[in-house]
Image (tube, grey):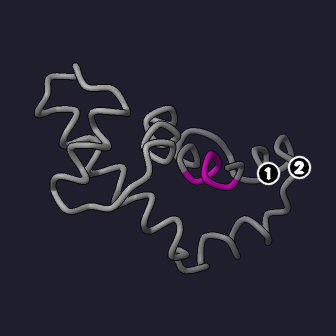
Amino acid sequence: MKSAHIRDHRGEFDVGAMCEVFDVTPAGFYAWLKRPEGPRAARARELTEEIRIVHAETKGIYGNLKISKELRHRKTHVNRKTVARLMQRL
């Protein structure tokens, strides 16, 4: 999460200063940038996009329970708690 925050704000602030604030070495940050995305992160990214689509289609009315049911109806196997966790991050 620290490295992701640094990545997202490196246009606004100096990377070295942010690394010092978050207690991350600049070498570690740049190594993290080059690392490929893991399967769990890829799945979370895909589910997040599907959740956004369902949420937009329902005009923001559906919560995690109905969204998880709708995703299962669309043949996306997902746990309600996973949907809740991803929705909280959004």
Residue 39 image point, x, y percent: 50, 76
Q: Which residue is painted at 61% across and 53% down in the image?
A: 4
- Give the mark count: 2
Q: Which residue lies furthest to the top in this view?
A: 61
Callout 1 touching callout 2 (CB < 8 Å): yes
Measured in 3D between alpha carbons, the distance from the residue under mark 1 to the one under mark 2, in whole angstroms, is 6 Å
Numbered tag placed on residue 23 in the rendering? 2
For the C terminus, the image quarter is: top left
Q: Callout 1, which amino acid?
A: Cys
27 or 4, which is in the foreground? 4
Q: Callout 2, which amino acid?
A: Asp
Q: Which residue is painted at 67% across and 49% down in the image?
A: 1
- Residue 54 vertical placement versus 43 (above, below): above
29 or 55, which is in the foreground? 55
Q: Does the magenta stretch include residue 8?
A: no
Q: Is residue 4 magenta?
A: yes
- Residue 3 vertical placement versus 66 (above, below): below
Task: Name the main secondary structure of what is drawn in magenta.
Answer: helix
Res 62 → quadrant: top left
Residue 9 image point, x, y percent: 56, 43
Element carrying mark 2: loop
In the displayed structure image, the side of residue 47 where residue 75 appears, left or right: left
* Highlighted range, magenta: 3-7
